[in-house]
Amino acid sequence: MKRAADFPQPIKRLLAENAGYRCSAPSCGKVTVGPGATANQSAKTGTACHIYSAADNGPRGTGGLSAEDRQKEENGIWCCKDHGALIDTNQGGRFPAELLKHWKRLHRDRILRERDGTRTNLGWMDQLEIINSFWFKPSAKITFSKSTLIYGNEPSGKSCVCQLLAGIWHSDAVERWRGRNHDIKLSYFAPESQTIHLTIQEREVHRSNETRRLPQGPSDLRLVYIDENFDHELCSYSDRDHLSRISTVFGTDPETVKSLCDDIRVNGHPLWRLMEFREEHITPNEDEGEPGRDGWYLYVPVGKYKVPFTGLAKSEQIGVMVQFAAALARVHSHDAPTVLLLDGGGWNWLDGLLDAFAPYLAKQPFQVVLVLRSRPSNFGGEPWQEWGAAHFECGEGIGNNTVTEVSR
């Protein structure tokens, strides 16, 4: 039965040609054209899939697009028959529109690179396999979407996984786990398929790919990471100015952090977009109990006023730090595929603030992994429609925790 937004034949052909007649799923790439039954025939086994549905009530909905717009090349992705069917199962819940758009961009860059030898800064963190860990059953796996929510009650191992993942780039992230043996494998595309292992054994941390030991993490995939205890780090340096403290959390230089305010004014979330660093030199007033100030201090708009960062509520401080993290990830994404890892398992993030940031983060030019203690109450609603999810669940006894993919 013909649907209002079915692709015309020229659009189907254009999607196939732009994809090099290969499936756009990152882990597939199957050729979808070849010899037919006779020497005078060819056979095509691919399919032109809709990102937003051809039918009003179909997988991923209409995205607010008209039927005419849903017939355009921009709303299509070329897949093999298997992936064409898979992405539409359960109303496309595991394959949101932003994920398919990223698949398409990654695949197109891959084809251009093969044809012209051009460089690409697109990439994709595909899957994390927990081969061995005292928290999990063997070979627990997380398959990442463009934006992925990880949630679960304590002690389900969420922060352990975040720190092991961050340890692929930064050995100090796994310091607390050196007394235990761990083995994880990260698969990613940059844009070709890559694999990197992180092993902790007898207090030694080792990284390797399929052929050799690696002295450091991958340069063709970058990470911006906020630990769940970032506020403790800020408090640990209470004798220093705001700029130095925030720079320490991100492991970058103060001038870079200061310059991020310019990016946030243009590309940041509307909440607290107009924050700024001010240079202050104030002598302490011991009679009034007022501490001195000497350096650069962050002021954040709250209503009609600009409030010092340390005067904000905890949930507001979290939002500000996420603004800086997203800005730093945007800067990195100009040069290499980038992942923003937010370990919010211990954060007091209100559902309203989460709902405000979820669509903003999903539209960014990098992947996002957000960790929370529990699933947001509105997770099935519109703010979270572009997110995938994984549920970490405590098992009976140590070493029996599990990971389950979740459909909205």
Image (cartoon, rainbow, N blue to C red):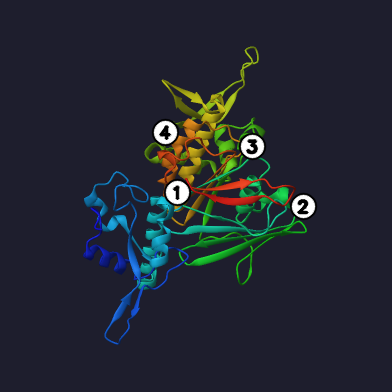
Residue 179: mark in rendering: 2
Please report the residue visible at 39 percent of the width from the left and 73 percent of the height from the top: 31
Circles 3 and 4 in contact, beta carbons < 8 Å: no
- The three-letter code of the residue at mark 2 reads Gly
Residue identifier under label 4 = 273
Name the quadrant of the N terminus. bottom left
Q: Amino acid at mark 3?
A: Glu
Please, what secondary structure does the residue beneath circle 3 have? helix
Residue 41, position as x, y percentages in the image: 28, 82
Q: Classify mark 2: residues with Cα within 10 Å, few (<14), some (14-19) or many (20+).
A: few
Residue 106 visible (yes or no): no
Position of residue 70 relative to residue 307, above or below, is below
Q: Nearer the viewer, residue 189 or 61?
A: 61
> Label 3 crowding class (10 Å Cα cut-off): few <14, some 14-19, many 20+?
some
Q: Nearer the viewer, residue 267 or 66?
A: 66
Cα separation, mark 1 vs mark 3, equals 23 Å
Query: In the rendered view, does 397 fall on the left or right side of 393?
Result: right
Q: Give the image quarter of residue 14.
A: bottom left
Which residue is labeled 1 in the image? 331
Q: Earlier in the sequence, mark 3 or mark 2?
A: 2
Name the residue tied to disc 3. 233
| Residue at image location 37% in from the left, 39% down from the top | 266
